[in-house]
Each structure stands twice: as C-alpha cells, then as structure tokens.
Image (cartoon, rainbow, N blue to C red):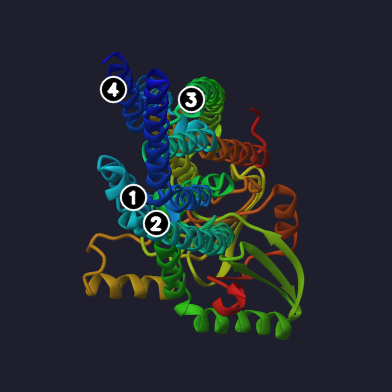
Amino acid sequence: MKNKVLMGLVAVAMVAVLSSCGKKPQAEIDAANAAIEAAKTAEAPVYVAAEFAAVQDSLNAVMADITAQESKLFKKFGPAKAKLTSIVTLANTVATNAATKKEEVKAETTTLLTGITTVIEENGKLIPKLPRGKEGAAVIEQIKADVATVDAAVVEAQGLFDKGSYMDALNKIKAAKEKADGLNAEVKEVLTKARIKF
Amino acid sequence: MRRLKKVWRRTFWFIGFTAFAAVAVILLVRFAPKPPDHKVALARIALSEATANKADTYSRNLFREARALYDSAMVNWQLENKRFLYFRDYGKVENFADLCARKARQAAKVSKNNVTDLNIFLKQKIDKLNTIVNQIDERYSAYPLSAETWKNISRGKMLLKEAEVAYNKGDYSLSKTKIADSEILLTESFEFATNHLKEYFNSFPVWKKWAERTISESRQNNSYSIIIDKYSRKCLIYHAGVKKYEYHVELGKNWVGDKKVKGDKKTPEGMYRITRKFGSNKTKYHKALLIDYPNSNDLQELRNEIARGVLPKNSKPGNLIEIHGDGGRGIDWTEGCIALTNSEMDVVFRIAGEGTPVTIVGSMVNLDQLID
C-alpha cells in the first residue's frame, strides 16, 4: 500500500514536470513596460530616438523569447528574467539621457532666445536711425517685413518653448536668429552708406 | 524467496513506469509541433531594420502593415500556446511572421529609396528657391513692391531657412512641409514682381528711341547730354555722342513708372532740358539742376488721363524735379528728384548748362538682357 502511494506521488510529480517547469515573469514584464512608458513620458522618442528604438526592440525580442518558452514543454524563463531586468536599467538610462538631452536643447533654445532678443532690441534702436522720410522706399519695406517675420517667428518659438516643445522651438529659433542677424547686418549697411552713426 | 520476488516485481514495475513516462515525454517532444521562434525572430529583425531606415516615417503604410502582421503573429502564437502541446498549429503564426518579414524588408527598401529621392528632391528645391531668393534680391531689392508682397517674400525666406535647418538635421519630412509653404510664397511673389516688371518694360521701345535721339543730339551738337537709367540707377553723361561719365543715382521712393501727379513720389520719364542751375547757396541739396518737368507732353498726358477718368479732375502734375546732391545714401529717398553724391554733383554741375538735355528712361537695356 505504502509503495502504491509512493508511485502515485512520482506520477503526479512527473505530470507536474511535464506540464510546467517555470512561471512567466509577469512582474518583470510589467516593470519593463513601465520603464519604457516612463522613457516615453521623458520624450525619449524625440530626444534620443535611436536609443529608445533599441530598448523597445530589446523588449520585443524578450517578449518573443518568453512566448517561445511558453511553447515548450520544459519552460525556462531565467534568461528572459535577467534580460527584462537589464531592459529596465536600460530604459531608465534612456529616460535619463532623454532628460539630459532635453535640458541641453532647452538651454540652447534659451541662449538663442536671449540672443535674438538682444539682436531684435538692437534692430529696434537702429531702424529709427535709418534716413528720414524713407517710408516708401523698397529697402525700408523689406526691412519692415523682415522685422515682422522675425517677431512672429520669435513669438511662435516662445510659444513652443513655453509648451515644452524645445526641439521644435529650437528649429524655429535657429532660422529666426539667422534672419535677425542678417537683418542687423543689412540695417547697419544702410546706416553706414547713409553715413549715420550707430 | 517470496519476499525477494515481490521486491523484484515492484522494481520492475517502477522501472517500467519510468521508462514509459520517459518515452512518452521523448515522443511528445519529438513529434510536437516546433514553435516558430526562428521565423518570428527574422520578422522582428526585419522590423528593426525597417525602423532603423526610418520606414515608420518614409514608408509609413508598408511599415504599419508589417507591424500589424508581427502583432498578429505574436497574438496567434500566444493563442496556440494555450492549446495542448500536441494539438498546436503554428502555421498561421509562421505565415504572419513571413509576411511581416517580407513587408518590413520592402518597407525598409522603399524607405531607403524614398529618403535618397527626397534628399535629392529637397536639395534641388532648396537650391531652386535660393536661386529665386537671389533673383528677388538682385532684381527687386530696390523695386517698390507692395508691403504685402514684401511680407510674403520675407515669410517665404524664413520658411526656407527653417526648411534648410530641418534638412541639415535629416528631418526630411519637416523640411518638405516647410519647402512647400515657402515655395508658394516665394514663387507667387516672384511671378507677381516679374509680371509687374515686364509690364513696366512694355515702354522699352519708347525709352530706346529717346535715348538714341539724346545721344544723337550730343553727337551732332558736339555737346553734353545726360541720360538717367532708372532701373540700373545710372546717370550717363555723353559728350559728342560718347559716354564720358557714369554715376550711381538715387530716385523717388516710388520710382517705377512715369510721374503722373504731384506727390506720387515717382521720377518722371521723358525728354527734358535743364532750365536753371542752383549753386550751393541756393539749394539745401548741395547743388541742383532744375529740369523742365512738366513739359507739354506731360501736361497733355495728364489731361488725357483726367479725360479718361483715370485721374481725378483736380490732379496737378507736380514740379521742381531736379538733379541734385546729397545722394549716396544707398536707398531711393527723394520725392521724385535724382540724387548724386556731392562730388559727382560737382562734376555734373560744372559740365551742364541751361538747355542741356536730360532724358530719363526706365532702362537703356531690354528686360531679356537684364534677366540674362
């Protein structure tokens, strides 16, 4: 009787072995997904797109590996678990890098916004010095149009900056700064030709 | 003996059962359907490559299809995993994975081609628009276009700059959008300005005739004649039919077209003569040469325009058009006069006398030559 019970237990153990040898690492999967979401929230796809794509790709690979293990009789989730843990670390690094890059872009945009404000202020002082009574002159019309365009671009860039879209703001302000500098040089050239001190 | 027999029987049964179980497991593993991990891995790699080639931006539809096929493969795989090992069928999963890999490779290829084509296309567009910008700057920087046109040109130039910034960063999609907006503004403004200029140059045959008569008179009388070329901003002084001096001039703020009425800030066009000379103590513009504007032709033209209802009945032709000093300011600033630098004015003042012909034309050169 004792031996029959023993054999029964062995059979049950074997069935258990046959049906499943490991458990899907759900907690690790959730942690990896959460870390990737956090990286997304940190705007990693905008500021460190390649790094983000790589970590996303790694997660896809691990998920495929987990599904593959689920297909097997003898499941082995150990390597997948380890990979998921490293993905969490990687995603956190990507999020940190995105934040750093975002700060860099923010700083660059701030510098350009400050720089362009200085140029616009200088232009504002120089333009009234242009030869008097030239309101209808083509050059003045162009300068006026350029001033309005630069002003509009700065307002737009500032709006994007305030919304936290630093990359878009940077792209806009770069072009506006170039234009404002060109305008400054043009006004100075007109003043120099007209022998007006500035 | 009986006890030993019993032990042997039990051992036999135990070994037999274990062997049976082992064989069953081996058979199960051996003949169970193989999971499609290799094909799915190939699909995933193809998708990664497509992403690296920016297929999600430059071959969006194919990439989306590939992505959806990969998701279908994974979902089906997970569904199959829920069935008993022996009854699983991964055929569908493999099909989805194969299709995904094919689509993803296609997306990567199309994206690569699109990026290359777009790169070339955008470069050409940027170069073309920069050429238009240069032509606008060369031909129209001193041309009195409307404030609205200048606004459009300015916005077009700014958008072009933004397109160049995006292009240099490799953001071709954004660059393309900016270029499309810039192109509309710049080409429309350029066409408008070109048509305006062409219309102005319709008078070229008349200008040519005036200039030839003026030079001919200078040759016949062995005397000085002055021709003002408004478009090229030149004061050309001929003696005995030969050009002796060439100076840069500044004109009325609204210099395009013939002067019609007082206050239109245009420099008149026609054949005139110097009527009076003003030395430095008689003018605020260093020295001045008054011309006989409006002459009988100008007055007749004014009457005709009033009669046609083009101008109001009380329109006055204006007067006091001079060649004077105080120029060299780099822009058109006079009310309709012609300004020279003081040193150049000294020369003109010295050689010109009352009665010296002053012919003012839109251009001495036809538009085709100018554009060339």
Location of mark 4 (residue): A8
Q: Earlier in the sequence, mark 4 or mark 3?
A: 4
Position of residue B82 relative to residue A90, above or below, is below
Q: Position of residue A186 (x, y in %)?
A: 60, 42
Work out whether residue B255 can be spotted. no
Q: Are marks 4 and 1 on the same chain?
A: no
Label tally:
4
Q: Give the residue at x 40% y 66%.
A: B192
Q: Give the residue at x 38% y 39%.
A: B20
Q: Earlier in the sequence, mark 1 or mark 2?
A: 1
In this view, the mark in front (2 or 3): 3
Dot 1 amino acid type? Ala
Whether residue B287 sits left or right of residue A31 in the image: it is right
Q: Residues within 10 Å of mark 1 (few under 14, many from 20)?
A: many
Real-space CA distance between mark 2 and mark 4, rounded to the nearest whole angstrom = 48 Å
Q: Give the residue at x 47% y 63%.
A: B110
Is the residue under label 1 in contact with that under label 4 (CB below 8 Å)?
no
Q: Residues within 10 Å of mark 3 (few under 14, many from 20)?
A: some
Q: Residues within 10 Å of mark 2 (few under 14, many from 20)?
A: many
Task: Name the chain under label 2.
Answer: B
Question: The residue tagged with tag 1: helix, strand or loop?
Answer: helix
Location of mark 2 (residue): B100
Question: The residue tagged with tag 4: helix, strand or loop?
Answer: helix
Real-space CA distance between mark 1 and mark 2, rounded to the nearest whole angstrom = 8 Å
Location of mark 3 (residue): A78
